[in-house]
Amino acid sequence: MNRVFEIAKREFVATVFTRGFVIGLLVLPTMIALGITVGPRLFMDRAFRVEGQILVIDATERVTPELRTALTAGTRSADLAAVTRAARGDAAANVMVMEALGMAPKLTLVEHPAGADLEHEKAWLRSAEPGGERHLALAVIHTNAVEPKPNQKELGSYDLYLPPRPDNRVEIAVQQVLRDAIVGARLGMRGLDRGTINELVNVPRVQSITVSDNGEQTGGGGFALILPAAFMFLLFMGVMGSGQGMLTTTIEEKGSRVIEVLLSAVSPMQLMAGKLIGHMGISLLGMSVYLVLGLLGLASFSLFGLLDLSLIVYLFIFFLLAFFTIGSLMMAVGSAVNDMREAQSLMMPLMMLLIAPWVLWLPISRNPNSTLAVIVSFLPPVNAFGMLLRLSSTQPPPAWQVWLSIGIGIVGVVGAVWFASKVFRIGLLMFGRPPNLATLIRWVRAA
Amino acid sequence: MATVHATAVPSAAAAVTLRGVTKTFGETTAVTGLDLTIPRGALYGFIGPNGAGKTTSIRLIMSILFPDAGEVRVLGHASALEAKDRIGYLPEERGVYRKMRVAAYLTFIAKIKGVAPRTIPARIKTLLDHVGLPTVANNKCEELSKGMLQKIQFAAAIIHEPDLLILDEPFSGLDPVSSRLLRDLIVAEHERGATILFSTHVMQQAEEICEHVVMIHRGAKVLDDPVSVIRNRYEVRALEFEPLQPGFDVNAVLALPEVESCRSIDGAYEIALREHSDSRAAMQRLIATLPLARVELKRPRLEDIFIELVTGSESRDAAHDLRAELRAGATAEAR
């Protein structure tokens, strides 16, 4: 047992006490912080402005005046900001919406009569002079866009033509302007005041209050969605980080031939156990750091009470199940190949298994007791991810399903470690052509 | 193919016993029906050309591999796994954790070999002094030269003062000075009382160090005897001489009844004697035929014996090819 501990200790120390590990541990929180603070500024189109001419053929002759008024009186962005401010009672919304939408469009209206030749006007789209105003769009307002045709109820719309290689931001801005103008014309025809309508349809959104055993907290709605993702991320990070570590260290030990020195002192099973325990320690350390940061974050937003602390216990139980299953298989792959390049093909099935929970995250967390969710929570090794998602969702599963999932997980661990130990024992001293799955199975039979 | 067996040693007194051990990899038989007994305290050389099955045999002794058939006993145990703390092993393909410092690496190896922690620092210091590297304890392994690393690896192999020391091609890649140092260290371990088995394909090394030689070819043992017995058993088949004056009559030498051929080697001459001829009589006739500055019986080298055992009655070409193969391996090693 001492030897296993010594190997585990060496793995732990060789990984944790390196600049790379410390930097790696800090990279994720740093990236999240940067994403929150710098990301919006990088990705928003604040400097972009829709600018150019739109040609309108208006058969109703009522939409064009609305357009003319809208384009001279103000901007869509300003209107939206005002509406949002009114809805949320939040002055900051003005700035947020303005930032989100970018600069107000600067559109020049070119009006053509209803009988204009459409084909001729389409040519206008491609006739902008270099350096001159851009020809952004041609809109043909349907005759029934404002009022339905006699004996009909449906209102019409408009046709929109764009020049080659259209920018979707231009399209969105033009459609918004046309929509507002048509709605304005329709309201005007019926003698309705737009400002009054806006006020009538506006119901401010309220912040929900979650009532838990620990009292009442606001803002818990998003928490319910984020919590499963956060737990799955911790589980994924713990399993994948160390799984990758075990793969690479095994390949390195095999490549540098230190493996034979180790095998002269310990058995392959002791070596494998030591490596698993060492990397489990590394994962637990990383997970604990992120968990503590997460709990501190919850406490700082007064949301700590929303977290069921038993979830942390389940996190560690399901981490152990997933870690020993995936980790031992990763080590088996590492022992069977000569370098990382050769590992790729054998890694593919494992990677697919690890990606599956991310694909299933939303369906399972939205409907945690669906047939899909139940099946996934009983299929090792993804059962750990599936059951943790269900446990952290709004409708936790019955206790018997949790225990059954843990039981199946333990069987999965035994099977994976058994398979991996057989491959590990033979693969460590095999060099040359990398094995395929059939060869691995043959090794297992032979070992 | 001729096979010579040593006198049986009671297995209780043996450090290593192999009985009918066979190991195959797919369709390749690496070791076939190998019987071997190494008495405690012996210094055995395990020799044969590259690919003969030496490393596989050693891995079988070490329980790194397991035989398909046959029995292995090491230090009185059914498996080396039960006696790992008493075995030192320097594999042919050896490596270290390159990012670890030398002292940390040796400490790690000592701990997994079961050395008492409090004795480890002093042991490391003594060993580094012995291998001539007293100042490298705090260096990272990757900072050391290949020769220095091999000394560290040897130190790691003996750090727990093993009863049985198994060295697979220990001299490969070493310069002559380091080879001599390593040879002295091996002899020192032997004098301490350790049983030593080392493999090499450079037969001269085995000839210089070993008390006993086991030859293996294509997975099968072809010779297993003390070096002294081998020397006495195999008849002298050549004489080497230097004439007192150059320009002697070669035909006079070739006319001697025992002489099969005569060739010049670096200013001296080597006479190949006919099979079953009397070497002493040949020497007396030669002295009577020519005025000589020097003449001596040329004892067969292990390489010659190996070739004779392996090729037997096969053609000269086969012997020539095998000799070339052996020398090519040795030359590549020297490079």
Image (spheres, coloured by chain):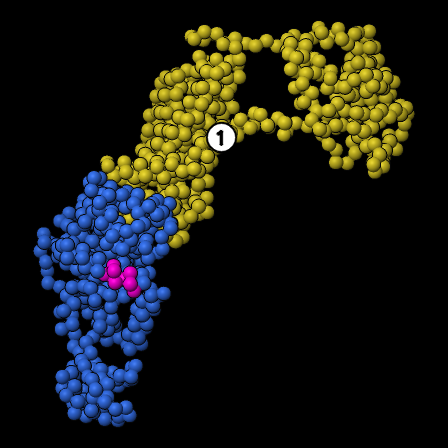
Chain colours: A yellow, B blue
Q: Is residue A236 left or right of residue A49?
A: left
Magenta segment, prevailing SS (helix, strand or loop) = helix
Q: Is residue A103 left or right of residue A280?
A: right
Q: Residue furthest front?
A: B135
Depth check: B335 or A118 in front? B335
Is residue B231 positioned above or below A435 on the image? below
Q: Position of residue B195 (x, y in %)?
A: 16, 55
What kind of residue is marked 1?
Answer: Leu
Q: Position of residue B230 (x, y in %)?
A: 16, 70
**Is residue A155 visible in the rendered structure shown here?**
no
Q: Is residue A180 magenta?
A: no
User: Which quarter of the rendered picture does the N terminus of chain A lie within?
Assistant: top left
Q: What residue is shown at x 81% (from left), y 25% (from top)?
A: A107
Q: What residue is shown at x 29% (from left), y 81% (from top)?
A: B265
Depth check: B148 or A143 in front? B148
Q: Position of residue A243 (x, y in %)?
A: 40, 36
Q: Quadrant of residue A88?
A: top right
Tell me where the magenta segment starts and ends, as one range.
B176-183
**Is residue A106 visible in the rendered structure shown here?**
yes
Q: Position of residue A89 (x, y in %)?
A: 64, 9
Q: What residue is shown at x 66% (from left), y 12% (from top)?
A: A91
Q: Chain of mark 1?
A: A
Q: Quadrant of residue A422?
A: top left
Task: Provide the secondary structure element on which disc 1 rests.
Answer: helix
Residue at mark 1: A28
Q: Is residue A322 left or right of residue A205?
A: left
Depth check: B63 or A77 in front? A77
